[in-house]
Image: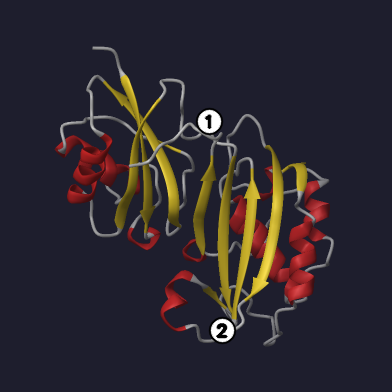
Amino acid sequence: MERRRYALRLAYDGRAFRGFQRQPGLATVQEAVEAALARAGADARVQPAARTDAGVSALDQVVTFSLRADLDPADLRAAVNLATPGSILCLGAAAVPRSFHARASALSRRYTYLVATGPVGDLAPWCWSLPDPRAFPDSGGAALDLGRLTRALEQATGTHDFAGFARGDAAPRTVRTVRRVTVARAAAAPLIAIGIEADGFLRAMVRNLVGCAVTIGLGLEPPGTVSSLLESPSRYRGVRAPGWGLTLVEVSYPPGWLEWV
């Protein structure tokens, strides 16, 4: 039988894992999903749309895998949900063309980063809470200026070489196109939601961009720092936003490629 290709749509609480990618002796999303597939008789390695870091959550992660078996997508989804821990939920499964790849076929990824400037109740575990004396010991209790933060992030829109905002990235191509940046303050809570959509991201790119923008918003870095780093070979050496505030919220593909069940 020829190899067939399948896709899974996953949501997970990243606080339970040391990232997506397998690491010896550590709990990872990839290890948990592949173990669930093996228990369902589908022993395969999965390829993700995004290799999320330790603590980073997902509402719409997509993975693909191939094997010589004819699987029913509904049964596959049920089997994965039966065998994975409660911190992972398979939202859908699909049979896909052999040319489809979770990462290479994606048009864009969209992340949301949550910053709390006061008590936010049950959302607190998924937010970067300010003030943060460990990250900003010299802030003097400065308030976060939303306008400065927004203008700093907007400097990242467009096509740039983001090598300076990557963490030891060995990718052969470090040019990415940030299509959209949004910054919104919640009406009923001291919560700021930062959205960044791009054709792709380098390792720690979003966390470094958010960390830099928050530092600027606190008045601890010049307003043009993001632009300066994008225009020079220098690396960002400042505060990196913690992983638990970041969530992968959407991966976009060409229409008609995926029919989730």
In the drawing, what numbered circle is on residue 12?
none
Q: CA distance from mark 2 to mark 1?
A: 37 Å
Vertical side of 30 occupied by 110: above or below: below
- Name the residue at 50% across, 33% down: 256
Residue depicted at 41% across the width and 79% down the height: 122
Report the front residue among 137 and 89.
89
Q: Secondary structure at mark 2?
A: loop
**Residue 189 circle label:** 2
Q: Residues within 10 Å of mark 1 (few under 14, many from 20)?
A: some
Callout 1: SS: loop
Judging from the image, the colouring scheme is secondary structure
Question: In this rendering, would 237 be left or right of 155?
Answer: left
**Residue 140 place in picture, x, y as percent:** 69, 87
Camera sees residue 24: no
Residue 185: quarter of image: bottom right
How dense is the environment of label 2, judged by Cα within 10 Å: few (below 14), some, or many (20 and up)?
Answer: few
* The quarter of the displayed image where residue 188 is located: bottom right
Quadrant of the snapshot with the C terminus:
top left
The answer to whether residue 1 of the structure is visible from this angle is yes
Residue 105: give its label. Answer: 1
| Residue 39 position within the rendered picture, expressed as x and y whole percent measured from the top left | 15, 39
| Whether label 2 touches label 1, CB < 8 Å | no
Q: Identify which residue is drawn at 56% across, 76% down.
A: 134
Circle nearer the N terminus (2, 1): 1
The type of residue carrying mark 1 is Ser
* 38 to 192, vertically: above or below: above
Horizontally, is 250 left or right of 32 in the view? right
Report the front residue among 41 and 245. 41
User: In the rendering, at what x and y percent does residue 160 appear?
Assistant: 76, 42
> Which quadrant of the rendered structure holds the N terminus?
top left
Residue 81 locus on image (x, y percent) = 23, 50
What's under tag 2, amino acid-wise?
A: Ala
